[in-house]
Amino acid sequence: MSAKSQQKCIVIFALVCCCAVLIALIFSAVDIWGDDEDGITEDNCSRTCRVVLVENIPEDVSIPFKGTISLTTGLHELLEQAHRFVEIVSPWWALNSTKYESLLPQAKQGQILLHQLMSLKSRSVSLRVVSELTDSSELKLLSHYGADVHYLNVKALTKGQLNSSFWVVDRKHMYIGSAGMDWRSLSLMKEFGIIMYDCSCLVLDLHRIFSLYWQLQYKEFVPSIWSKKLSALYNKGKHLHLHLNDTEAQAYISSSPDVLCPKDRTKDLDAIFRVIQEAKTFIYVSINDYLPILNSIQTRYWSRIDNMLREALILKNNIEVRLLVSCHEQTNPMMFNFLWSLETLCVESLNCSLETKFFSSSESSSGHLYGVNHNRYMVTDTSVYLGNLNWVGSEFVFSTGVGLVISQTVEEGNSTVVSRIKAVFERDWHSHYSKTLKPNNIQACIKHTVKQQTAST
């Protein structure tokens, strides 16, 4: 072999080695690979879906269901549809009540759901759970009955908490809502969510978020490279076109925080901004807490959502904005200051309208509030955003959450998801539990909080 041939062989060998090392480095960086998708693709998935709105309305809260069914009924029916997989992400696991709480008749709802989950193995249905609760007795019990539980260290990954709440069933049915796996969410608290059946195109995208959580178990860093199997299929620029109860719609899934959003995944804040931008006549928001504050090393103002609403009020002619917030034991008094500040924008203007009410539940004989409104959604004349997070700066920046955006053309006499959720909001807004926010008036829930804190000290 000539010297020239030997040199050529050495160069080729060196290039091959470099490529091998480069490929190894890339593959080692991609340590979150995605999950098996059962052969479901964008080409063969289902876009014709059945939608059910679910609520928990406590017995002591006298408002009727409005085009919705009870949350417990919806979740039980969802489990009955399961043939292969049930995948659950929940911030809480407290379906079993304490010895004292078990005396309450409402506590039975959680126990019934827990036993239904425990029986999945006997039906040859696999139960997979993502949680950050490493010492949960209920998760240990479910593991004993065949559940596979992965623990997500959100504090190490993002300095936040796991606030995501959703189900994926057989990769074709799903639930997203405010309720976690807590018996109070099935009985004492006011919750709202959505269940979709036979909607594998959208569920496939939600399952990719579950897969992301699933494979982050025990990790304490966020990978810099994500597998393509975790990329979003649909987003604010590429909506999924589908039929919801025989009505045309567009939809996509968003998530938080930013660092856990792989390629093409729309962030929750961007989804909220887009929905607000596209609103023409009204923006109705039902939310537990509204607090544009970021609590990190020191408390500071967080302007993202606050500015979105201010911009809409100033720039959109004749826009009507209604904010329905909750009033409960943990309500931060600063929330009312921010709401009063928003209201002043329309005091001297005839081109906008902003009203704020607080949903005030009743006090039980034990001194605690029941019927707290945990709803977390926004509805406009064109779209609805349903999420897992309170509108609090720290939650969007640090904690995990999932959102669902549905856009539809609302026509008179045409029942759409958007129009039905608007009807739910208006029912709550006009109920006797919703009270107008009055400037410079300390609300009853804050007095209750002060009373509780004083008693505890």
Image: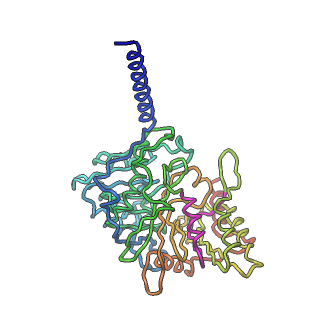
Above-or-below relation of 192 to 256: below
Question: Which range is magenta?
Answer: 267-292
Residue 310 placement, left or right of 34:
right
Residue 367 placement, left or right of 76:
right
Above-or-below relation of 333 to 355: above
Magenta region includes residue 249? no
Report the quarter where the N terminus lies.
Answer: top left
The one of 15 and 347 positioned closer to us in this rendering: 15
Query: Can residue 423 be seen?
Result: yes
**Measuring 65% from the left and 68% from the top, which residue is drawn there?**
309
**Measuring 73% from the left and 71% from the top, which residue is drawn there?**
441
Q: Residue 284 location, x and y as percent?
A: 58, 74
Above-or-below relation of 440 to 419: above
The one of 331 and 5 positioned closer to us in this rendering: 5
Q: Residue 117 location, x and y as percent?
A: 31, 56
Identify the image quadrant of residue 94: bottom left
Magenta region includes residue 277? yes
Residue that protrudes farthest toward the bottom in the picture? 413
Q: Residue 378 location, x and y as percent?
A: 54, 69
